[in-house]
Every structure is written in structure tokens, then in C-alpha cells.
Image: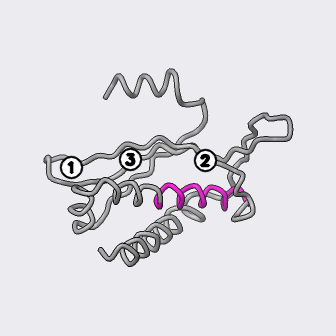
Amino acid sequence: MADTAAHLVDRVLPEVPCRQWVLTLPYTLRFLMAYDSKLITEIHKIFIQAVFASLRRRAGLSHLGRRAKGGAVSFIQRFGDSLNLNVHFHSLVFDGVYVEDTDGFICTIALRGNCKTFGFAWVRGHTARGIENLQRFAGK
């Protein structure tokens, strides 16, 4: 794990502020996810899309700024501290959004407000609704 962290810091991640987001889920979903990699992928996608949408909102772009992108590196952790089954996500998310200008350069758009204003509760609500819709659609 230390080699992976060193590789990310030295060769992959840009020098920008980052914030760690962790998504834990109810036990029933953890057990389903333990045996269903597609479900892990779908829930992770819902979560990251909610985080990126929150960043666009904090940048003042909302749905009109879909060209603005976020950046993240996520790790799926399957066990808790006591080696119990606990599928959850650790995501290192760039604290800003990025847009390509007309010359092809990447520009950073600063965020307004703080995570308490536009972030945690909004991401939690959107993620929960997305997972509920996924379960309803998939019949799980």
C-alpha cells in the first residue's frame, strides 16, 4: 500500500488540494456488494457522480457546467478494522473543478462556500436516492 501511495503522489496526482470522502453502507448492501462486483461499480458511480455534482454546485455551475470535470482516485476496501466484512469506498477527490478553455488548456474553477454548506448532506441525499433507485430498478 505504501508503494501505491508513493506512486500516486509522485507520478499521478497533481499538486492541488484534495479531500477524502468515505462511503459506508448499511449491512444488507455490504453483503450484497461482497458477491456482486457490478453492484459495487454502480454504487461507486452513483457516489462519485454525486460528489462531482456537489463540486460543480459549489463552483456555481450546477447542471449547466457539465463540461466541468472533477478528479478522484478511489479504493474499495472490503474489510473493517477487525477483518469483518465491510465493503466501503475511500475516495481522494480534488477540491475543485476543471474546464478546458478554447486553447485546450485546463483551467481550475475555485469553489464557493464550504462542504457543510453545499457538500456532505447534499452528497449523502443524492447518493441515497441513487442507490434506492438502483435497488428499485434491479429488484434487490
Q: To which quarter of the image does residue 5 belong? A: top left
Whole-angstrom CA distance, mark 3 to mark 1, is 12 Å
Does 67 sit above or below residue 6? below
Q: Which quadrant is the C terminus positioned in?
A: bottom left
Q: Amino acid at mark 1?
A: Gly
The N terminus, quarter of image: top left
Q: Which residue is mark 3?
A: 90
* Nearer to us: label 1 or label 2: 2
Query: In this figure, which residue is indicated by the disc labeled 1?
Result: 80
Q: Position of residue 4 (x, y in %)?
A: 37, 27
- Identify the amino acid type marked 3: His
* In this picture, residue 76 sits left or right of residue 107: left
Q: Which residue appears at 68% of the width and 52% of the height?
A: 111
Rendered residue at 31%/53% (across/down) = 37
Query: Residue at left 19%, top 46%?
Result: 81
Q: Which mark is residue 71?
A: none
For label 2, the SS is: loop
> In the rendered structure, which segment of residues is drawn in magenta?
46-60
Q: Residues within 10 Å of mark 2 (few under 14, many from 20)?
A: many
Horizontally, residue 5 falls left or right of residue 66, namely: left
Q: Position of residue 6 (x, y in %)?
A: 42, 23
Q: Does the segment drawn in magenta span residue 133?
A: no
Residues marked 1 and 2 touching at CB (< 8 Å): no
